[in-house]
Image (cartoon, grey):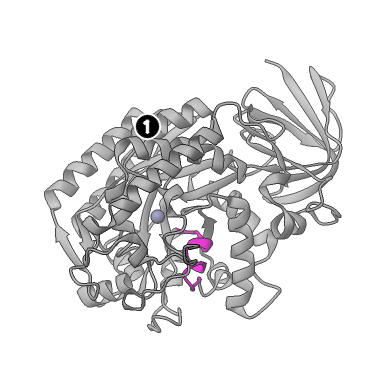
């Protein structure tokens, strides 16, 4: 096996349990792993590659993604209000995306999304959806590390009148979908060399029965896999859970023994202490005590006018905070910046939600949630999932403290090369396994078909232009 040494002036290397800055160092890769990192070149390497003007960081881990649908989130969610459902797009817009994307369109979205997440710095992505078999194949082909979870639920929400949310229950269908999700996990290679692995993805806290979630927790232990569930993602959902159980979404999950170190809560925004729910209790303590994690996809909510209150409060409470990409754009770089900046605004402080906090969330904290001490860090024995950033760019220079520059100023254009499992998935900003222009045209067509479906899906039969009016009048 060839061993290659990459010499660079800036390396974020892992030492004694934390990221540290290694100046003028070397990372040696052999096969799929890092076999050495340090200030000096070991004697036995086959090849030395000098990378002047380069920052090397571990690849990022997106712990919340919907590759099969997120591309069509654009221009149907922004600059509109929805006071009845506390500004969420989940009640009126999401059903349109579910109904408007056929199987072919979802596969196209997956093909479009994989290069997008790579350009945004993710080398590992957790896909939550209903196109899992295809995602597993596509990720394997692309060489992108992926966890796939086929969603299942006991019911679905809908609004009959734009005023209230109702639930249609079919518990037997939920049980059948759960069995299929377990079978998928069993088919995927969960071994140390598996690039694509499985996890369990009960869809949402308000759409899954207690029985389904208890079965999920047991199966996850048996299969030894992570679990992801959407919870505390909207005020309507928070109120629904308190109405049903007298408990917050997090308290209810805790009360049915669901929370554990395996669990990643998707979003987790509306917890006790958030000003929009003003509900007494200590959700964060329950999360911290059970070692459950939260995957925060900041932009997804910030664009609708609300954020977590606050990222640093969760950290202070001892909650393992991770980041997700979720909606469009599927960019971990942007996600880190939104999280850091809005965290400061929500805390009314400038010394919290630091670049280091969000970098940890995007790397080691996420790896811990997956039970993967070999991801999210550059150290001997870790997987060679590496990002090579060009520092001789307007955005990346001047460079004094790389995490600050990267998080507050870096862009996708500054990311030059991406390695996953010791293999290149992007070189010199070129991705040779996807025709991104053709895929963009395909997504345009898929979205256009979806937009047409609105009157058949919307409770009031509105067109998309009625639901989300164009910002500009047509030029006459
Ligand atoms: Zn989601």
In the picture of the structure, the residue carrying the numbered disc 1 is 134
Q: Nearer the viewer, residue 467 or 48?
A: 467
Horizontal relation, residue 278 to residue 298: left or right: left
For image coordinates 17% across by 42% down, the residue present is 176
**x then y, percent, for residue 214:** 24, 54
Residues shaded magenta:
293-307
Residue 372 visible here: no
Q: Confirm whether residue 186 shows in the render.
A: yes
Q: Which quadrant of the rendered structure holds the N terminus?
A: top right
Query: Quadrant of residue 48 in the image?
Result: top right
The front one of 263 and 129 is 129
Instruction: State how many labels appear.
Output: 1
Q: Quadrant of residue 255?
A: bottom left
Residue for point 78% across, 53% down: 395
Where does the image place residue 43, in percent across and percent down from the top left?
A: 85, 22
Place residue 110 in its image quadrant: top left
Q: Residues within 10 Å of mark 1 (few under 14, many from 20)?
A: some
């Amino acid at each position: 096996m060839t061993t290659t040494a990459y010499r660079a002036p800036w390396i974020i290397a892992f030492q004694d349990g934390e990221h540290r800055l290694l100046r003028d160092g070397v990372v040696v890769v052999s096969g799929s792993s890092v076999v050495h990192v340090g200030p000096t070149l070991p004697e036995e390497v086959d090849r030395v590659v000098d990378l002047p003007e380069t920052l090397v960081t571990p690849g990022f881990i997106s712990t919340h993604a919907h590759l099969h649908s997120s591309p069509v989130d654009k221009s149907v969610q922004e600059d509109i209000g929805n006071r009845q459902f506390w500004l969420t797009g989940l009640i009126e817009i999401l059903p349109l995306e579910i109904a408007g994307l056929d199987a072919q369109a979802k596969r196209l979205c997956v093909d479009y999304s994989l290069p997008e997440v790579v350009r945004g710095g993710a080398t590992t992505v957790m896909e939550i959806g209903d196109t899992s078999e295809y995602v597993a194949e596509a990720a394997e082909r692309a060489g992108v590390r992926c966890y796939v979870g086929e969603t299942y639920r006991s019911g679905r929400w809908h609004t009959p009148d734009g005023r209230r949310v109702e639930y249609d229950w079919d518990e037997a269908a939920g049980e059948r979908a759960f069995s299929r999700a377990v079978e998928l996990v069993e088919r995927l290679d969960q071994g140390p060399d598996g690039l694509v692995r499985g996890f369990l993805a009960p869809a949402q806290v308000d759409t899954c029965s207690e029985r389904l979630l208890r079965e999920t927790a047991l199966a996850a232990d048996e299969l030894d896999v992570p679990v992801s569930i959407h919870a505390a993602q909207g005020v309507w959902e928070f109120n629904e859970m308190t109405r049903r159980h007298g408990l917050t979404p997090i308290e209810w999950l805790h009360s049915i023994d669901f929370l554990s170190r395996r669990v990643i809560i998707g979003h987790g925004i509306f917890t006790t202490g958030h000003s929009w729910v003003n509900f007494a209790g200590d959700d964060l303590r329950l999360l911290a005590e059970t070692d459950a994690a939260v995957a925060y996809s900041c932009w997804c909510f910030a664009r609708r006018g609300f954020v977590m209150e606050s990222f640093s409060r969760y950290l202070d409470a001892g909650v393992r905070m991770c980041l997700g990409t979720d909606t469009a754009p599927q960019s971990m770089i942007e996600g880190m910046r939104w999280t850091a900046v809005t965290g400061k605004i929500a805390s009314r402080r400038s010394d919290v939600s630091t670049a280091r906090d969000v970098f940890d969330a995007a790397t080691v904290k996420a790896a811990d949630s997956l039970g993967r001490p070999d991801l999210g860090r550059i150290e001997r024995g870790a997987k060679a999932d590496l990002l090579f950033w060009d520092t001789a760019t307007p955005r990346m220079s001047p460079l004094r403290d790389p995490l600050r520059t990267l998080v507050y100023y870096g862009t996708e254009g500054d990311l030059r090369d991406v390695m996953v499992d010791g293999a290149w998935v992007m070189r010199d900003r070129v991705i040779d396994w996807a025709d991104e222009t053709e895929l963009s045209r395909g997504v345009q067509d898929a979205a256009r078909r979806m937009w047409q479906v609105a009157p058949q899906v919307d409770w009031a039969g509105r067109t998309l232009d009625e639901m989300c009016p164009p910002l500009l009048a047509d030029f006459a």
